């Protein structure tokens, strides 16, 4: 099983659509979770952190289900500018069980929003 | 402006030559990371450093070397021992302190082509 697994897509949706991405992770001790966005041939940029209670930032909503080791990202009212690859990212504790900054990245989900 | 800089943006080398990629940050972050990204794949960790004068191998360290003599700088050398060096190289940094969420911020990347 991959440490962080995402549906690679691609997802092709019309403007205004709602689209959801899912991600599963293998280590139940993980403490920090993120969604990053990566445009073609650019660096990844932090889109949002994911908190246990779920969080929303404008059109974007992130959810965390620790019991199922599952993270989701919902994008409402899709814009052309949302076209990008969305990376699910998880902080894995080290062998001693303490958290530190090593992040594990999923392969990414490609989203294309068309007119 | 605070941020992470990488230079050069594009680099071309002949097979058998060592090449050093630059990464500088003025965010006062303790931790720095090097990743490699190949087309259609996720980010893979090469090396990371949590404090000055200390660094650890990541998942794919063979054929690479690093140094961390200053907090701001974390150069990566791609040696001739690296079998498939052509890739997009990304440097990142984070606060990496207990109580933080460990989100990482990326530089713009260096595209290395070895022929």
Image: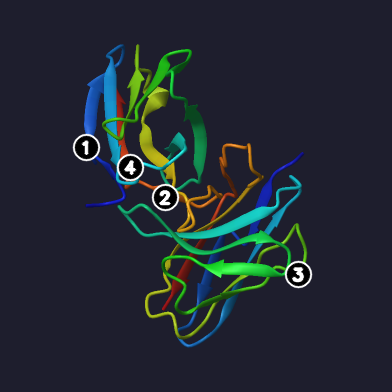
Task: Name the residue tied to disc 4.
Answer: A108
Give yes or no for contact between labels 3 and 1 (Cβ–Cβ under 8 Å): no
3 and 2 marks on the same chain = no
Task: Name the residue tied to disc 1.
Answer: A9
In the rendering, at what x and y percent does residue A79 appear? 38, 18
Label 3: state its secondary structure.
Answer: loop
Q: Quadrant of residue A108?
A: top left
At horizontal 42% and vertical 50% (from top left) the residue drawn is A104
Closer to the camera: disc 3 or disc 1? 3
Closer to the camera: disc 4 or disc 3? 3
Give yes or no for contact between labels 1 and 4 (Cβ–Cβ under 8 Å): no
In the rendering, at what x and y percent does residue A63 appear? 37, 22
Provide the chain ID for the residue under circle 3.
B
In the rendering, at what x and y percent does residue B20 appear? 61, 73
The residues bearing labels 4 and 3 have C-alpha atoms spaced at a distance of: 34 Å
Closer to the camera: disc 1 or disc 2? 2
Task: Name the residue tied to disc 3.
Answer: B69
At horizontal 27% and vertical 20% (from top left) the residue drawn is A19
The residue lying toward the viewer, choosing from B70 and B16, is B70
1 and 4 marks on the same chain = yes
At horizontal 22% and vertical 52% (from top left) the residue drawn is A1
Give yes or no for contact between labels 1 and 2 (Cβ–Cβ under 8 Å): no
Task: Name the residue tied to disc 2.
Answer: A104
């Amino acid at each position: 099983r991959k440490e962080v697994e995402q549906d690679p897509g691609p997802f092709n949706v019309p403007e205004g659509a709602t689209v959801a991405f899912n991600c599963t992770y293998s280590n139940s001790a993980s403490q920090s979770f993120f969604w990053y966005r990566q445009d073609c041939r650019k660096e990844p940029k932090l889109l949002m952190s994911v908190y246990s209670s779920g969080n929303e930032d404008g059109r974007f909503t992130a959810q965390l289900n620790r019991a199922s080791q599952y993270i989701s990202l919902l994008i409402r009212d899709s814009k052309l500018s949302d076209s990008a690859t969305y990376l699910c990212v998880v902080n894995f504790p080290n062998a001693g069980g303490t958290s530190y900054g090593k992040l594990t990245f999923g392969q990414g989900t490609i989203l294309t929003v068309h007119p | 402006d605070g941020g992470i800089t990488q230079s050069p943006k594009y680099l071309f080398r002949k097979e058998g030559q060592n090449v050093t990629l630059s990464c500088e940050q003025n965010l006062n972050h303790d931790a720095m990371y090097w990743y490699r990204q190949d087309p259609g794949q996720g980010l893979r960790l090469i090396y990371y450093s949590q404090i000055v004068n200390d660094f650890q191998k990541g998942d794919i360290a063979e054929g690479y070397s690093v140094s961390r003599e200053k907090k701001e700088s974390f150069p990566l050398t791609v040696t001739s021992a690296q079998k498939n060096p052509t890739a997009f190289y990304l440097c990142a940094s984070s606060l990496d302190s207990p109580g933080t969420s460990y989100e990482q911020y990326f530089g713009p990347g260096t595209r290395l082509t070895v022929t």
